[in-house]
Image (spheres, rainbow, N blue to C red):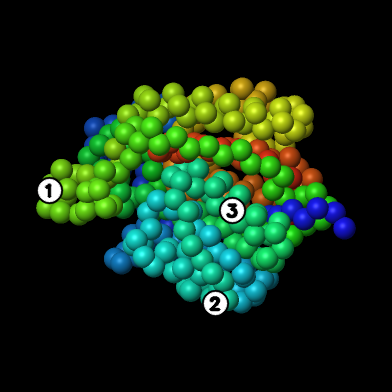
């Protein structure tokens, strides 16, 4: 019997129906389609509408989509890990709510908060439960309702973000397929470059915090862009070097969808062409923890057993990392 690895054996996602276009945004804030496309590569983004529904609503539907596609009974799921920075509430955890809504009544669930790197952090955590032999079926879901913390009067941030959820199923594999390796980093000194100031224990919600607009995304765009290009590129190349992989060995780079220019710079450093980059930022924008699993869903039909994937992300705070995945099944042709 070979070493146990955690293989991705299914994917699922949920995108809200409402689509916010660049033209509509240009009527809300001083921007236009040409500027947004040239600086970010984003054309549209999905926005979750409806009172009293948040990230768990999307996450549960992504998990149900995953379970329906794979034919897995929700009662067989042992663990549900949700990566999010827009939890429904501080407690109970959004993962707990997703597990309940999706019928995973036997699973224990919790959240991981690592901003746009959250899915990689959660995927690595979920893989450990499989590798240890303590769990047979683990779901990792990225879910973020970024529209809930976006300032739609800030032209530098409001065009970037959208809402979505996507999930993967992890199961044991002894043929060498699945999560092969992860390199993960964090650096809290980047705190003030990308953050939300209020709502936590440091600045609890008050009239002052609301009036000062401290419950929305704040950032230094230039600093974040520069750090993202450097960190995502460095860690992706490090992963390739660690496993003696060349550009031609990589089937796809699965990058966090923050900015098309960041994706292009990372691909160039890795020595791969854009046709080997999974991209849906043009349609979805930056959905934070949902971007990478959403890409896996969109490109599932193109994936074949044994394909080498490098998953790469950078997030606020700072967090960043790369995960090497050897794909475990042939995706169905659309």
**Residue positioned 59% across, 30% down in the render:** 235
Q: CA distance from mark 3 to mark 1?
A: 38 Å
Q: CA distance from mark 3 to mark 2?
A: 20 Å
Dot 3 crowding, Cα within 10 Å, few <14, some 14–19, many 20+: some
Q: Is residue 179 visible?
A: yes
Quarter occupied by the C terminus? bottom right
**Residue positioned 76% across, 43% down in the render:** 307
Q: Which disc number belongs to residue 125?
A: 3
Q: Is residue 40 above or below residue 48?
A: above
Please name whichever residue, 148 or 203, is drawn nearer the observer in this view of the structure. Answer: 203
Dot 2 crowding, Cα within 10 Å, few <14, some 14–19, many 20+: some
Q: Earlier in the sequence, mark 3 or mark 2?
A: 2
Q: Which disc number belongs to residue 103?
A: none
Q: Residue furthest right?
A: 1
Please name whichever residue, 13 or 288, is drawn nearer the observer in this view of the structure. Answer: 288
Looking at the rendered structure, the number of numbered marks drawn on it comes to 3
Camera-side mark, 3 or 1: 3
Residue 288 position, x and y percent, is 45, 45
Residue 210 position, x and y percent, is 16, 50
Q: Earlier in the sequence, mark 1 or mark 2?
A: 2
Q: CA distance from mark 1 to mark 2?
A: 41 Å
**Residue positioned 72% across, 50% down in the render:** 178
Q: On the image, numbered disc 2 is attached to which residue? A: 105
Q: Is residue 199 above or below residue 101?
A: above
Q: On the image, numbered disc 1 is attached to which residue? A: 208
Residue 177 relative to residue 1: left or right = left
Residue 3 relative to residue 92: left or right = right
Q: Earlier in the sequence, mark 3 or mark 1?
A: 3
């Amino acid at each position: 019997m070979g070493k146990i690895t955690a293989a991705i054996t299914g994917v699922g996602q949920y995108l809200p129906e409402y689509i916010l276009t660049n033209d509509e945004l240009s009527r809300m804030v001083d921007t236009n389609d040409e500027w947004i496309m040239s600086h970010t590569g984003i054309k549209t983004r999905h926005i979750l509408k409806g009172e009293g529904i948040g990230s768990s609503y999307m996450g549960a539907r992504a998990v149900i989509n995953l379970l329906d596609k794979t034919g897995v009974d929700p009662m067989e799921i042992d663990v549900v890990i949700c990566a999010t920075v827009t939890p429904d509430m501080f407690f109970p955890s959004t993962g707990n709510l997703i597990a309940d809504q999706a019928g995973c009544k036997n699973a224990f669930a919790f959240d991981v908060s690592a901003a746009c790197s959250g899915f990689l952090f959660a995927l690595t955590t979920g893989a450990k439960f499989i590798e240890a032999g303590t769990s047979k079926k683990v779901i990792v879901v990225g879910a973020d309702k970024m529209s809930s913390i976006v300032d739609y009067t800030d032209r530098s941030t409001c065009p970037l973000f959208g809402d979505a959820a996507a999930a993967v199923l992890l199961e044991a594999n002894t043929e060498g397929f699945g999560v092969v390796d992860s390199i993960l980093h964090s650096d809290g000194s980047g705190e003030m470059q990308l953050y939300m100031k209020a709502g936590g224990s440091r600045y609890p919600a008050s009239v002052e915090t609301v009036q000062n607009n401290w419950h929305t995304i704040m950032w230094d765009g230039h600093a974040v862009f520069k750090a993202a290009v450097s960190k995502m590129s460095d860690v992706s190349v490090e992963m390739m070097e660690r496993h003696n992989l060349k550009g031609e060995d990589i089937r796809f780079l699965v990058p966090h969808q923050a900015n098309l220019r960041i994706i292009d710079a990372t691909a160039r450093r890795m020595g791969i062409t854009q046709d080997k980059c999974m991209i849906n930022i043009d349609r979805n924008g930056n959905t934070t923890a949902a971007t990478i699993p959403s890409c896996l869903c969109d490109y599932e039909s193109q994936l074949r057993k044994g394909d080498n994937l490098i998953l790469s992300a950078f997030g606020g705070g700072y967090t960043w990392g790369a995960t090497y995945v050897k794909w475990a099944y042939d995706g169905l042709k659309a």
